[in-house]
Image: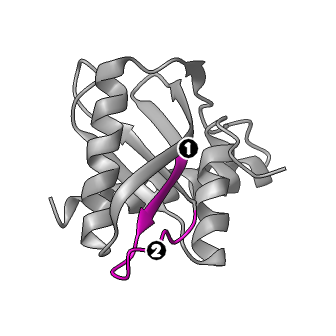
Amino acid sequence: MRYLLPVLSALALSACQSAQDSSNSSSTAELEVAKPITLSARQISSVRSGVTRVLKNNDLEDPRFGKMLAGRTSKAVVVCGYVDGKDSSGQYVGERPFHGLFLGLDNASSFIVTGTGGTETENAATFEVCRRSGLDLTPS
């Protein structure tokens, strides 16, 4: 599992880069935009569980979830949202964006976080992946 996240992240980012390269050429290929959906209670639970695991790996606890957007592509359910967690001193670090997807045929199990914000660069990359997926989290 530890090695799966970087691989999935690389695949997601390479798909975005491939789509960008294609759109910059004479080709008409585009990145598939997710059709907005409402997450089920089971899906929300799976998202919370997946994001909580990532926070613990980054020494953050007690997550609070904010806005979450989801969409279905032909191959997956993509989720983008905001999460806040407490650091070792018990202070919330501030909302940071995340994105991920569901694996599995039922699209309610095995939520994999493919990226999180934190630094300005990480936030920008996360917002861009979500925007390209049709799930624009960018603050107004």
Q: CA distance from mark 2 to mark 1?
A: 17 Å
Residue that appears at 34% across and 58% down: 62
Q: Are marks 2 and 1 in contact (CB under 8 Å)?
A: no
Query: Residue 124, how many percent across, how many down?
Result: 67, 66
Marks 2, 1: nearer the viewer: 2
Say which quarter of the image contains residue 29: top right
Residue that appears at 68% across and 49% down: 22
Q: Is residue 23 visible?
A: yes
How crowded is the residue under tag 1: few (<14 C-alpha within 10 Å), some, or many (20+)?
few
Q: Please name the residue that numbered disc 1 is placed on.
A: 66
Residue that appears at 62% across and 66% down: 123
Question: Which span of residues is magenta-colored?
Answer: 81-94
Q: Nearer the viewer, residue 48 or 106?
A: 48
The quarter of the image holding the N terminus is bottom left
Query: Residue 135, how many percent across, how many down?
Result: 64, 37
Q: Please name the residue that numbered disc 2 is placed on.
A: 91
Q: Nearer the viewer, residue 40 or 129?
A: 40
Q: Which mark is residue 93?
A: none
Residue 10 among those drawn in magenta: no
Residue that appears at 17% across and 66% down: 2
Q: Amino acid at mark 2?
A: Gln
- Residue 28 horizontal side relative to residue 52, left or right: right
Residue 84 among those drawn in magenta: yes
Q: Nearer the viewer, residue 114 or 13?
A: 114
Q: Secondary structure at mark 1?
A: strand
Q: Secondary structure at mark 2?
A: loop
First in sequence: mark 2 vs mark 1: 1
> Of all residues shown, which one is farthest toward the left?
1
Q: Amino acid at mark 1?
A: Gly
How crowded is the residue under tag 2: few (<14 C-alpha within 10 Å), some, or many (20+)?
few
Query: Residue 44, how many percent across, how many down?
Result: 37, 30
> Of all residues shown, which one is farthest toward the right?
140
